[in-house]
Image (cartoon, rainbow, N blue to C red):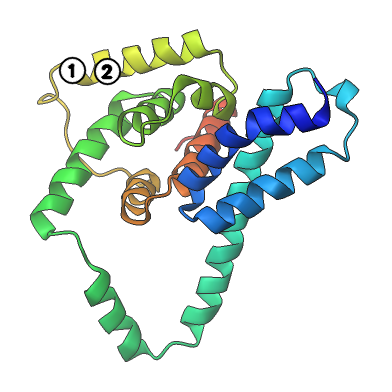
Amino acid sequence: MNKDQTIALYQPVLHQIALRMVGSIADAEDIVQDTFLKWLTVNHEKIENTKAYLIRAVTNNCLNHLEALKRKKDECLQNLNPAELIDWYKEKDLFHFDMENEVSAALAIIHKRLEPVEKGIYVLREFFNFDYEELQHIFDKKKDNCRQLFSRAKDKLTQETNKIKIDLPQTNFIENFKKACHIGSPADFIKGVKQEIMEKLEGKSF
């Protein structure tokens, strides 16, 4: 398969992933194009799985894009009048207090019951409709393994939860999830889960 055929074959799935992560058609198209341009410059003989390579590359490019946008927004907020900032937050506060408490309690149960990789796969699959092919490349696991982890997570969550004391954990997990729902992009959530997995592997407390 030549380069043009490869681009034609994988462009749709890469665009779907990018659009889901950044929430903008134009930005998604630019990111996919940039991903292919960089791919054209590398030694393809060293790439064992082209599709996995491209999906991982476009995911990382989306994360970098959103990080750059966040820095730009932070710079804008630094120049914003405090009174204007308060008004802006009031206008954007779409969560009802009781609903936010319910969501936080449910997420606290997920956080307490599931291992980091189980948590990431369950939330992305259940709430953001990621398919197993996308999940296997995000978490570097086989599709069958992802299915097993999702099933295991569901089994854990269907067990009785009234024995769990719902103390909200000191973690970015809940805030990243709410942010993903609010802006329609799970990029920060994915980044946070990957960080938690690494810290778990390194034996750090989270």
Which amino acid, mark 2? Lys
| Rendered position, 47 above or below 36 | above
Q: In this view, does 100 lie to the left or right of 121?
A: left
**Neighbour tally class for label 1: few under 14, some 14-19, many 20 plus, Cα within 10 Å:** few
Q: Is residue 154 left or right of residue 180?
A: left
Foreground residue among 195 and 72:
72
| Numbered disc 1: secondary structure | helix
Q: In the rendered structure, are the residues bearing label 1 and label 2 in contact, judged by CB atoms less than 8 Å apart?
A: yes
> Do we see residue 64 in this rendering?
no
**In which quadrant of the rendered view does residue 147 lie?**
top left
Residue sitting at x 51%, y 72%: 73
Identify which residue is drawn at 65% across, 54% down: 30
Using the rendered view, name the quadrant where residue 88 is placed.
bottom left
Please identify the quadrant where the N terminus is shown: top right
Q: Where is residue 17 in the image (x, y as percent from the top left)?
A: 52, 38
Residue highlighted by disc 1: 158
For label 2, the SS is helix
Question: Alpha-carbon neighbours of circle 2 within 10 Å: few (<14), some, or many (≥20)?
Answer: some
Looking at the image, residue 114 lies above or below residue 151: below
CA distance separating discs 1 and 2: 6 Å
Of residues 28 and 53, the one drawn nearer to the viewer in this rendering: 28
Q: Quadrant of the C terminus?
A: top left
Image location (x, y in percent) of residue 126: 31, 29
Residue 82 position by quadrant: bottom left
Total numbered badges shown on the rendered structure = 2
Q: Mark 2 points at which residue?
A: 154
For image coordinates 18% across by 41% down, the residue present is 105
Q: Residue 71 location in percent, x, y?
A: 57, 68
> In the image, what residue type sits under mark 1?
Thr
Label for residue 170? none
Point out residue 66 in the picture as x, y percentages from the top left corner. 55, 57
